[in-house]
Image: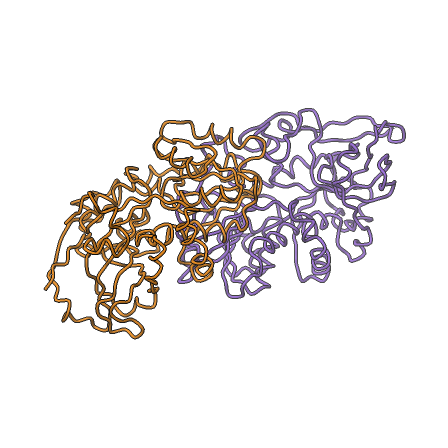
Chain colours: A orange, B purple
Amino acid sequence: MVTNHQVLFDKVTPTGLPKPGETTKPGSTELDIDNVPLNGGILTRNIAVSLDPTMRNRMKGDIGYFSPPYVVGQPVTAIGIAEVVRSEVNGFSAGDIIYAWSVGIEEYTIHPASVAPTFRKFDPTLLKNGLTITTYLGAAGMAGMTAYMSIKEIIGDLKPGNKMFVSGAAGAVGQLVVQICHQAGVKVIASAGTDEKCAFVRSLGADETINYKTEDLPAKLKSFAADTGIHYYFDNVGGDQLEAYINNAARYGIIVACGYISGYNADKPEDVVYPKNLFNIVTKELKYQGFIVSSFIPKWIGKFMEEVPQMLADGKLKNKEDVTFGVYGAEDAFLRLFTGDNQGKVAVLIDTERAEKWNLKKQIEGAKVWK
Amino acid sequence: MVTNHQVLFDKVTPTGLPKPGETTKPGSTELDIDNVPLNGGILTRNIAVSLDPTMRNRMKGDIGYFSPPYVVGQPVTAIGIAEVVRSEVNGFSAGDIIYAWSVGIEEYTIHPASVAPTFRKFDPTLLKNGLTITTYLGAAGMAGMTAYMSIKEIIGDLKPGNKMFVSGAAGAVGQLVVQICHQAGVKVIASAGTDEKCAFVRSLGADETINYKTEDLPAKLKSFAADTGIHYYFDNVGGDQLEAYINNAARYGIIVACGYISGYNADKPEDVVYPKNLFNIVTKELKYQGFIVSSFIPKWIGKFMEEVPQMLADGKLKNKEDVTFGVYGAEDAFLRLFTGDNQGKVAVLIDTERAEKWNLKKQIEGAKVWK
């Protein structure tokens, strides 16, 4: 028997920030990993999970979100990497490392057979390039795929000399968008919530930054737009920043709509800010298009895996990670996504015992290990 | 000397309905058409103009609209067809019939040389197919091009069996969109402001209609969406109807953003309704794209002129026109666009003396002739 430590969903929280200890709470069960019935499914030992703002929407009950709401009393789930312990599904066997959309924030998860077709095998030799397992959940994982594939799919070829505004630019996706655009010769203005984050984003190649909490964002966008307008907007936040972009968009401007973080934790639905200038979508002939990476992985994964992990390993793409060690640390780590206290891509290493195997030995030294 | 009757712009009117006699007023000047100096430009005798909702935005002063505001004391201008009387521009000579973006609502206009490159010659033999000159300003002109080209450009191939919502469906553009979609095997639900207009739109092939003034539009859209959602939305109006579509959109739904009529005459900017559910642009991966026909005429005009006039002549495409006879009728006709009292595409035949030449002999009989 082992103790399976878990972060459980505990209370539907439609508004405000998620509350550790209330929205979610720590828990545990005893598990006989050798004999627990799998009912045709797969038992995994979980290695690491990615924490993403979009998970907040699954804590609101049934709001018609495209991912189902979390179930009270059950573990919160996330995109993660896990090792197969036992499998009753053909094609998977003990020792396989898999990517899955729905890894419990817990040490072990029993996956029903029905989800196995969505698993993707992770090639552990990829770690030989020096990248960590959490990088494969971030810059070389979903966040990287989101940045890379959404630009390919919605913008196509970036035109050197064009201008781009990136919001949430210090976040997991934003920091990669800044670099991809900068390296393509695009002029980048980027927003973030602290001066420190702005400095980080400038170090990645942003030409200008805006601390949206202390600076006049519309004025800075207007000045950056100058005579040409701004050709692209990578939108992680929606709300006021989206409105400001639309006012400063170039004709035929393109908005990659990747998130709407400004609205995720509103106290009341009426508090969510929506742009009041959509008429410009018509008059400037803008394209405003939503993107969810799962729709385009089959199309772009080959090209992505050829290019991006190597660029990260070579330092041609940089990424900053905010890794928490241990299951119970996930509650605080998730909250940091919304308070802005995170430093880059937020992930949790669940398998802290094998940190070295996952190339996180250096990072775990001296760090707090939860549980 | 001839008297040049004109509709003059008289007062910047930022909000509310345009007011005949106040926003615009009738006027006239004496013109020596044989000797008036052209300063290198072109004198035209104007045949007909198209009245379009978008002109309302040019009556608001300088609001940053893509077309310049009308000038107080000068004639209101519109898209029109005119005959060259005298030309000092190479390539144009007396008797040429031209399409122009900026024909004065007056009997004669002097065009500066700088606008001549935007003129397109009209082949008068096109009238031999029985179509009227005003049809070449509507279904076979800008309105038709807008319907045809925006679908080609933003949606691409319509998929039979998919569902489409068209707002403003009895209008110049909407009535053609309904027919194009219906003939492509798309299931169409369409909104209009009177039961009579709804019946007309059903006669064009709409499967269902909604009188948005008397019926519960969101409920009818929801029922039409059923399990699949609605795949396309052709948006002429914005506001509440746009919000209702977004709530009932299929994943990967496409919004052709062609106008925002619901906002054009608001008494206060705060009265304009904007959707409060843009988060769904992300989660449903919608594409919401603005369209202005002038951007795509060069790309699609050949295919359009090959197909559409003949379809109209053969009755394979139907169109309803609301033709006013005489310059001074333009004021009332323009107002009808917003009160909903128009019956189809609104145009003004300026050259009432030659109605027969423009295939409008039957229509002018018994009709009111202004001026």
What residue do we see at 34% from left, 61% from top?
A125
Residue A13 visible in the current orientation: yes
Residue A95 vertical placement versus B357 (above, below): below
Please identify the residue farthest to the right as the structure is shown.
B34
Residue in front for this viewpoint, A267 or A178? A178
Residue B217 visible in the current orientation: no
Q: How many marks?
A: 0
Q: Is residue B268 left or right of residue B305?
A: left
Query: Split into 4 quadrants, where in the image is the N terminus of chain A?
Result: bottom left
What residue do we see at 66% from left, 34% from top?
B331
> Quadrant of the rendered structure where residue B57 is?
top right
Residue in front for this viewpoint, A319 or A16? A319
Name the spot of residue B159 as percent of width and height, x first: 54, 64
What residue do we see at 56% from left, 33% from top?
B17
Name the spot of residue B119 as percent of width and height, x first: 76, 42
Q: Is residue B137 left or right of residue A257?
A: right
Name the spot of residue B37 as percent of width and height, x first: 85, 27
Residue in front for this viewpoint, B364 or B112? B112
Residue A303 vertical placement versus A269 (above, below): below
Residue in front for this viewpoint, A152 or B122? A152
Name the spot of residue A172 as percent of width and height, x first: 36, 45
